[in-house]
Image: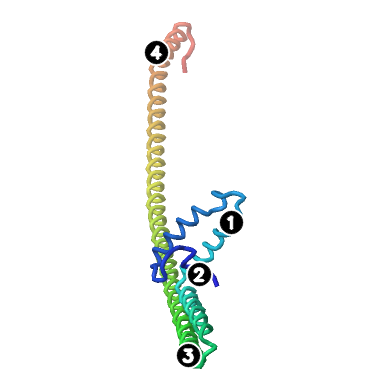
Amino acid sequence: MKNYYTILDVPESASAEMIKNAYRTLAKRWHPDVNPNDQTAEQMFLDIKEAYATLSNAIKRNFYDYQLRKEALDKKVQATSNTNVGSFRKQQNQEAKAKAEKEKADKEKEKVFYSSETYKNRLDDLMKKHNDLLEKQKKAAQKTKEKEEKEKTFYDTFKENRDNAYAEQQQKKYKKEEAIKEEVKEVQNADNQAVAKPQKNRIKAILSILGFRSD
């Protein structure tokens, strides 16, 4: 069994931050890009990745520590298995092992249960936040729509008033122009009559001299 602590060169009591820093340092050192065509470096890099993948996960690390201690304990028991004392200790170790495995299994089940509950609660919380966000977006869209409709109504009213004012102005202008035309026409008629009356009188006088009636 590989000793991941030895591979990462950290103690078994190392914190998650120590493990991460050790992994980064060793990964840069043994990366295949830094050591091209080096089988040893490539294998070392894979071992480092494998060790970090296990020790960086709390559940995997706990199980690995258990296996590591179990392996060490089995080796000690095997060394004394040829004596009665060794057989007695081996039996005790087996009982302790069975008890530890049962407790470990119970804890794992408990972790899975709480993990499921945590995931469910987290999912419910995310769904609530999602629904709240949708509701806020819906309200914001409604306000924007109402604002646009209000602005549109104001603009339409303004446009209508402007068009009415322009039409009224054009009507007044047309009436004024018509009045001016009528006035000009009257002046022209008056001028024509003023010019035509003397001429008519002269024609009557000439006809009278000639002996003709002017009627």
Residue drawn at x 48%, y 57% is 26
Q: SS class of the residue under badge 1?
A: helix
Q: SS class of the residue under badge 2?
A: loop
Q: CA distance from mark 1 to mark 4?
A: 136 Å
In this picture, residue 187 sits left or right of residue 71: left
Give the residue type at disc 2: Asn
Nearer the observer: mark 1 or 3; the answer is: 3
- Whether residue 102 is visible, yes or no, is no
Nearer the observer: mark 2 or 4; the answer is: 2
Labels 1 and 2: the sequence-earlier one: 2
Q: Which residue is mark 2?
A: 3
- Asked whether disc 2 touches disc 3, contact meaning CB atoms under 8 Å apart, the reply is no
Nearer the observer: mark 2 or 3; the answer is: 3
Give the residue type at disc 1: Thr
Labels 4 and 3: the sequence-earlier one: 3
Q: Which residue is mark 1?
A: 40
Q: Which residue is mark 4?
A: 198
In this picture, residue 186 sits left or right of residue 76: left
- How busy is the neighbourhood of tag 3: few (under 14 within 10 Å), some, or many (20 plus)? some
- Could you say where residue 130 lies in the image, as x and y percent from the top left? 44, 69
Q: Which residue is mark 3?
A: 89
Labels 2 and 4: the sequence-earlier one: 2
Give the residue type at disc 3: Arg
Labels 1 and 4: the sequence-earlier one: 1
